[in-house]
Image (cartoon, coloured by chain):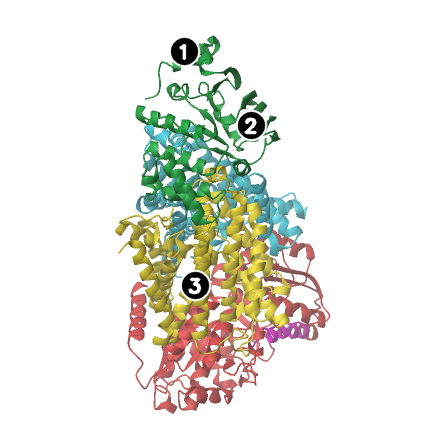
Chain colours: A green, B cyan, C red, D yellow
Amino acid sequence: MLSVERLTKRFGGLAANEDVSFEVGRGEIIGLIGPNGAGKTTVFNSLAGFFPPSSGQIRLDGQPVAGLPPERMAALGVARTFQIVRIFKSMTVLENVMVGAMLHHRAVPAAIGKAREALRFTGLDRRAGDPASQLTVAEQKRLEVTRALACEPRLLLLDETMAGLTQNEVQEAVELVKRIQARGIACVVVEHVMEGIMPIADRMVVLERGRVIANGPPRAIAEDPVVVAAYLGEEYRAPGP
Amino acid sequence: MLLLQTILSGVLIGLVYALVAVGLTLIFGVMDIVNFAHGEFLMLGMYASFWGFALWKLDPLFTLPLTALLLFGVGAALYRVVIRRITDAPMLSQIFTTFGLMILFRGLAQYFWSPDFRSVEGSVLTGKVAFAGLQFGLPQVVAALGAVATSGAVWWFLRSTRLGAALEATAADKEAAALMGIDAQKMFALAWGLGAACAGVAGALLSTTFPIFPEVGASFILFAFVLVALGGFGSVAGAFWAGILVGVVEVVGGFLWDPAYKLVLVLSLYLLVVWLRPQGLMGKA
Amino acid sequence: MSTTFRASLLAALLGAALPATAEDVTIGVIYPLTGAAASTGLELKNAAQLAADLINGTEKSLALPMVGGGGLPGLKGAKLKLVFADHQGNPQVGASEAERLITQEKVAAIQGCYFSSVTQTASQTAERYGVPFLNDSSSSVGLTQRGFKWFFRTTPNDELFVQNAFEFLKDLEKRKGIKVKRIAILAENTEFGTGAARLQEKYAKENGYEVVEKILYPPKGTQLTSEVQKLKAAKPDVVFQSSYLSDAILSMRTYKDLGFLPTALLANDAGFNDSEFLKTMGKDGNYVISREVWALDLAALKPVIGKANDLYKARHGVNFNGNSARAFTGMIALAEAINRAGSTAPEAIQAALKATNLSADQLIMPWGGIQYDENGQNRKGAGIIVQVQDGKYVTVWPAAAGTKDVVWPLPAWEGR
Amino acid sequence: MSRAAAGRAVGLAALVLAAVFPLVVRSATWQNTVILMLMVAQLGVAWNILGGYAGQVSLGHAVFFGTGAYVSTLLALRFGITPWVGMFAGAGVSAALAVVIGWPCFRLKGHYFAMATIAVGEIVQAVVNGWELLGGAVGLSLPLQNTGFWFMVFNRSKLPYHYIALGLLLFTLGVNWLVTRSHVGYYLRAIKDEPDAARSLGVSLTRYKLYAIALSSGLAAMGGTLYAQKELLIDPGSTLSTSLSIKMSLVAIMGGVGTLAGPVIGAVLLTTIEEASRLGFGGTGRGTDMVVYGLLIVVIAVYQPAGVLGWVKQRFPPKAAPAAPGPGGAR
């Protein structure tokens, strides 16, 4: 469904991504991992339309979409969350999700209906009327996912949704991603929390210094000596708190 | 010849604009607050010079250090009493506050010193500087040199002293500066003191040529805003060079085109620059 | 300073708090008391108040109508009570204040407003309510072309002033053989400046002069270098200038610094005749020629001028000037009409104003008198032309009123 | 009673009060003061769509106010077109102008945007000042003699102006309310809170900011027409000045930015302060009124930066927060 072809992004002289290529199939979960500064978030921003790539192409169902602005990408069915949460603080939880739902349901009553449905799906419905700023960090992250889901995407980009969560919360998040996948929505997940991503990913893409160094099923990746040397060796043994 | 004379006249007045703007940009850079009452610091500087001259026959040039100190005190005190409370307020409330201060200062000046126009007559700064067929008023030349010296001193202070470095660090990143043990409150007060002092010095330098009245700040504040945005919010060097640019564009543009539109020319230049380079000429993106 | 202020504040508060007694005749007076023109507004206010106090008082030494009568004899000795309002230079505020004075303070008439734009809106309000409006100090021509029935203007308007200036130039040519050819116009691009510049250009062309440069500049700027350079390049004989105080001062200093010296500088009143102008300019202000409506040296011809000025100076420490003398005269003319009306009914006052016929010797102005035409314009107004000589404004035109000969051309800046 | 219900009750009471006020209070001065309040409130509400909901702080809104005043006045003077039509023509011209101005300016953010709008305002004022067709510095005057409904000029009675001003305010509030109840309102608030997040949800920043400035400017222009009809004199100094632009934002800030009723409350407060300080101290000629006015503004801004409604919100926290889209406080 999504194919990334030799994606390169330079800032000034520095290449944040170089020749990054991978594919995402319908309803697949792809784990995007790599050490800090490997260029994961840059890939994300290119996919979501925030950075136009310096070269390379991104295709959505075969159509070239590289360089389209985020609002167009959203309309084409690509939704995202942010590494540092960006919820609408002056709004209630429901209103936050309504903004997402309005992409396809402009009328307020319809948007409310869609938003409530999304909130029920992610289990935030009991907090619908609360100001979003009163949510816990885990809830805020969940709110971002809900908001993105309300856009009815085909592809969901999740940026470190599990970072900073407790063990229990990570489990809930894992469950949520599985249920999202069950709806036929593909997910690209950037994650540091390996125990969160390894069990659910269909495939893993490993970045180092802007390049893809490995691409395959989680089991194979975990045993790939290149990856272990670059990354897993240190990180997998020290999962997040 | 007339054109060269005009260009140089533009540079002279531009340097004074620059000094006013340096103070404004200093405050902005450190605190992210646009000070609408900045022209009133200039007005206070002018009145300080005037009263020194009227009461004790002290020439504005000699009382300049005192004026600077006095305005430093005013700026720092204003920070302690008022601005401190709006540091984290939304931008609109900050605008609102400094706008209120502007009206308040003008009202106070009229209350205490009457709306009459004052001037300093018979300062040591009278006469002309003439060379190679060009001529300028001595006060303008001294004002321009004083502006260069003061702007330079501020620049040096920020670059080469520990206190200046601390101020720059606070401007760059408040949290990081706090971790380094820098007292942000002190730095903010310092920025306001320095900013007010710069405007006060500009006022003192202008006091021998410019009429002094409660609303005199209004003439300069728009230029100061333009320079701060043109040079890049928070960039002292940017404000300085923008000052010269704007002075020349204003005077030469008025001369070659129509003086009625000299402000339009300056503002259009400003809009064009920020449209092409939203961060200003020397601002950080 | 602060005690007199406190006293005046107290007086103002008491005045506002106590309703006028049945005897009092309340007159609303609107001037710019805050903002850029506040200093002029204060002079106007002081002059109007002085006139009212003289009318209410019993000191008869001043031979002017109503003065010393202990009030208005036509209304059984009713006293004049002035209620001042501040229009801040804002036409909307002027209109609101006029309305407040009319409906709240129940004023019998309104005097004001100095700024032509404010006079326009404030007099509209008066017109709507049918309350007489006496305009003492706005000279925009259009004000008396609106077909208003309640609007009366004592001062001559700009057209007359501009005509005067050219008559003066013709007179110079006739009497002294001084030939002026090239005229430059420098004016602030406000209602006041552009209006004057337009008239000056028109009359210059009609009278066969060459307008070599016409510069409209934005007022209250930080520098006038470009304007002066343009003037310098145009090499005019005479510069006609319309500027308010801060620009008048700034332009004079710039002339001197840049070595610009026309044959003569003919100023259009305003900043050049402000009390602060000479105080600030010192010797550099000498030899400026300006149109005026009043000058202290006219006291030589008309002693009452000197006596009125002494009273004003005793109170406020400065001499009358064109503005304050007009405010004073406006109040006298208004009081005289109300007295004749014998009533505070607006129609009566309106009728009395229409019938006003004051003679030259009843005024402290060099006018032929006060008599309004069908538009409410005083047809007997006249301008004079003054020149600063030895730090004083002396009348140099018309010859009949002139006390001194004009100094022409401008002497060099140095060695004055 | 919930806060929302209390708010509705207060709003209804205020409406009734405003509707009967000139019938009960016959003093023209008081009537005039209330008309000023209504007019300023209308401008604040109009400004609020862009400055409050969308968070784009414009300090050049006098341009749009002036456009409305000049367009309707020109149409009336040149073609004898009634200001009732001119008002909407002015709104249209103003909205178009706003898009032209807004499109480049929206590249700028925060302070840069605010400063750019000041610059645009000053440029427009200077250009109109030299534009003969528009009367230059003298401005344009409407004749006092043509009175009546068709001309929208009324003599002594303040009632017509009062009800036109009230009607215009209600219309503006109505548009505002519709905006908050539609996706546009949600999108504007989203843009203000987190522009990047809004984009990721399919919101085009430029398009919705342009919607906001077009609406906001069109409504401000209608206020300009009313001003011209009431004062009968428009000149660059009084209809295009930056201080007028600042005043529009001041009332919104005083009452509560980004709220429906905030600018109305702010207008009542600001007009009261202005009039009281001028009436109390203006006649002295010592600038006392400016001291009082300036001091009050500073005190309010420092101690209640979220405006009157912010204070109400703190003082009376919502009991059961309903999902009703009650816009948040000033941020």
Query: Where residue D326 sits in the image (x, y, percent)?
Result: 37, 51
Q: Label 3: which residue?
A: D170
User: For the magenta stretch, what is the residue range?
Assistant: C156-171
Dominant secondary structure of the magenta stretch?
helix
Tell which subunit mark 2 falls on.
Answer: A
Query: Where residue C364 sits in the image (x, y, percent)?
Result: 48, 80
Q: Label 1: which residue?
A: A233
Q: Nearer the viewer, residue A163 or D62?
A: A163
Tell me the SS state at disc 2: loop
Tell which subunit mark 3 falls on.
Answer: D
Q: CA distance from mark 2 to mark 3?
A: 51 Å
Circle nearer the viewer, 2 or 3: 2
Q: Residue at x 43, y 58 (%)?
A: D44
The amino acid sitting under disc 1 is Gly
Q: Label 2: which residue?
A: A1
Label 1 crowd (10 A; few <14 / some 14-19 / many >=20): few
Residue C166 colored in magenta in the image: yes
Label 2 crowd (10 A; few <14 / some 14-19 / many >=20): some
Residue A41 seen from this side: yes
Tell me the SS state at disc 1: helix
Q: Residue at x 66, y 47 (%)?
A: B3
C257, above or below C399, in the image: above
Q: CA distance from mark 1 to mark 3?
A: 67 Å
